[in-house]
Amino acid sequence: MAAVKNKARIPKQKRGIETKEKIIKAAMALFAETGYHKTNALEIAARAKVATGTFYSYFNNKKELLIEIVRQFYKRTSERVLLNYEPKIQKNKADNYKEGEKLVHFMVQALYLSHTIPPALHKEFLAMKLLDKEIGEITSAEERNITSYMISMMQKYKDFIRIDDFEAAAILLHSIADEVIHQVRIFGMDIDNKRILKELEDMICRYLLQPAS
Amino acid sequence: MAAVKNKARIPKQKRGIETKEKIIKAAMALFAETGYHKTNALEIAARAKVATGTFYSYFNNKKELLIEIVRQFYKRTSERVLLNYEPKIQKNKADNYKEGEKLVHFMVQALYLSHTIPPALHKEFLAMKLLDKEIGEITSAEERNITSYMISMMQKYKDFIRIDDFEAAAILLHSIADEVIHQVRIFGMDIDNKRILKELEDMICRYLLQPAS
Amino acid sequence: MAAVKNKARIPKQKRGIETKEKIIKAAMALFAETGYHKTNALEIAARAKVATGTFYSYFNNKKELLIEIVRQFYKRTSERVLLNYEPKIQKNKADNYKEGEKLVHFMVQALYLSHTIPPALHKEFLAMKLLDKEIGEITSAEERNITSYMISMMQKYKDFIRIDDFEAAAILLHSIADEVIHQVRIFGMDIDNKRILKELEDMICRYLLQPAS
Amino acid sequence: MAAVKNKARIPKQKRGIETKEKIIKAAMALFAETGYHKTNALEIAARAKVATGTFYSYFNNKKELLIEIVRQFYKRTSERVLLNYEPKIQKNKADNYKEGEKLVHFMVQALYLSHTIPPALHKEFLAMKLLDKEIGEITSAEERNITSYMISMMQKYKDFIRIDDFEAAAILLHSIADEVIHQVRIFGMDIDNKRILKELEDMICRYLLQPAS
DNA sequence: GATGAATGAGCATTCATTCAT
DNA sequence: GATGAATGAATGCTCATTCAT
């Protein structure tokens, strides 16, 4: 309702960019340590060794800062997952299942490796995705990106694939792979993470791939 | 001086129990409508048509109220999932896979049906599970319960099962089924929910069950 | 300004008197333990094993209860100091100073012995005497009583006395004796209390009594 | 998590120091007018023409403010009492008692003059010394200072002194002189203050000084 | 641009007191 | 008389945000 005051400075000079980066670094550290809700602007400014006023000249408010952080994270993650070189898959090999397994392994690994921020911070992101509409939308857009990419991959390798509903499959696969990786990375479950990831890959393969004839 | 003042009244009389219930109802409605963080004690009391002081004579603070709500939810969910009658599975049937599918369908349905609180409220629970240690622990305990139950089911029907690592499988299955159901219930994804759930069941079956010979 | 609601019940029956006494006992204990200001009606009622409502049917409020306690204390103290039998003083003895010393010793002892409530509670009384007008007045009245008594004693034994201004002397003596006894009883000073009391008596004697000729 | 959040701002700039001083002034006025317990942070801020938040950026809470005020008071008092020039006392005069009287008079006057804050405020200090442990400790430390000074004075003029136990005497003298001065300044007793102070000095002299041979 | 002092609405919490049972 | 649940004004304190220097 209220007109958004868009006073946030967009730094052009080197010093300004560095200051903004200092603030983001400090905020990430604090969000990871004590959580987004329990961190306040004063603390962020203090940690960044910057005056409170400076904070507000770069970000209109705390949430905008979070959005910036989340955006940066997803941008980097996307790049890592989507732009990664594909493995060498041989379409005409005798055993398509084996080749498919390679592909699945590659994708799960890519997803796993893309989650490189501190678990505690990631936890905050996931929570904020649920709690905040804006963050939720950013996340959804990102997920749609990844899902589209997966559909295109299925189409490319459709001879390997046993299921029909590519869209549902993509959503399902992304959803579960992401969740399992979160579980593994964030909660660091008691039992060996490798065991879980192995089962995950097996599950995806059994579901997705044409069985070896 | 003592770290925690445990003044919360434990109502013995009918009136007290009703009042407490009124507060819980009001809080659930508000948490669902505006979220836990954006709801305050005053609003809860007002919605429950109760004085602020009354709120604080039943709960030491807002979080304790949330914990009570979460506990109640999990207790009911557990009862529904765990105590549900099992479907009639015939162990000696010719087609074990078909019977297995019935079992999987039954379990997914049970899990689906157990999530009967308003999606918005559930969203809050999931977020708080990530944000708050105490809530996180309650949730973990609950998850361990369900995982144990699943392991025992696998042992009971081990002739149907193709995988070896029951523990990893149980964790994996619980994790993904829960996640997909949340996605479906909370985000009410664009594409037909039935399509997703159908794929989920298919995936679980392919992964879990001995293929039809 | 506001008309004082004088609803406080004056118990006639044994049960009522006992209940009131229970409340007073509980309050004294709590005032001593945690202080008047940090004690609330609920706690007093709880300690007295009585309902909150019952508290308010015996006392209009917390301060009235304090006043009752202070009154009781001064009544008992007065009785002990004033009604105490006097020592046998021989007016015609050769050495008046020696006899005077006996008298002073007796009075200091009487004052000392009259302070029989727990030091922590006494501390509260002294503070409330400073902070609260009503309590201050009760205390002042009491002090005037004691001062008068001291003047009459000086008159009775005027042959022993070296000073002229009986009134100023009585006020001074009461004031300092009381203070020193408080110091000794309440703060339990590091150095031996007996040394302090001995010096006090010596001081009073030197000041008050005709030197031995 | 940490027991005490030490956020209190320590003003470096002129403006900050002035603001802090404004708050202290306002608080002293209000404590004197209505007492410490009946004054709240809001009122102090309002009187100082400052926002509530400003109050809390200089003091963590009301008690910390009181402590600061008490500290300032004792610092000033000490300086006045201890650093005051001594009167010219002639050790070899014929009449030591006369010289001693001068000394006692000087000390009582110094003590009297050192109590320059409004009586009502002083009353609050005395009450808080009894009610609050921290304030009590500050006061005790101060009293030990003064007592030490008195002992050193007695040693310096030991030829004038009739008593042996310097330590007990110092404690006793400080205690009673302080008390009588409080009585006089705070309660402004009915009878002429000069009469009381005169008797006080006489008493101290008789007790402390070698009689004129 | 940067600073950090100042703001004040907002929220959590307490407790003296009342009153229906 | 006794009970204890309910009341709600009062108060302490926080923190996002502004703005004079």
Image: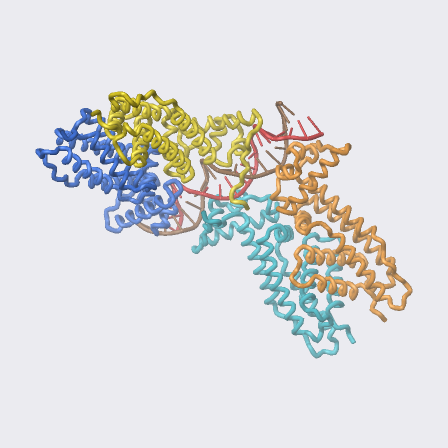
Chain colours: A blue, B yellow, C orange, D cyan, E brown, F red
Q: Residue at x 54, y 45 (%)?
A: B2
Judged left or right of residue A122, residue F13 is right
In percent of width and height, residue B115 lies at: 37, 26
Between A124 and C153, which is closer to the camera in this rendering? A124
Q: Nearer the viewer, residue C136 or D151?
A: D151
Q: Position of residue C32 (x, y in %)?
A: 65, 47
In the rendered view of the protein, which quadrant contains the C terminus of chain B?
Answer: top left
Q: Is residue D118 visible?
A: no
Where residue C165 sits, quadrant-wise, is bottom right
A87 sits left or right of A201 in the view: left
Q: Residue at x 28, y 28 (%)?
A: B159
Q: Position of residue B141 (x, y in %)?
A: 40, 36
Question: Up-down: is B177 above or below A73?
Answer: above
For residue C30, side relative to residue B165 (left or right) = right
Image quadrant where residue D114 sits: bottom right
- Work out whether C29 lies above or below D99: above
The vertical placement of C84 against B6, above or below, is below
Residue extending farthest front? B92
Q: Residue D192: image x %, image y %? A: 75, 56
Q: Nearer the viewer, residue C163 or B128?
A: B128
View extreme (left): residue: A92
Q: Nearer the viewer, residue C61 or D21?
A: C61
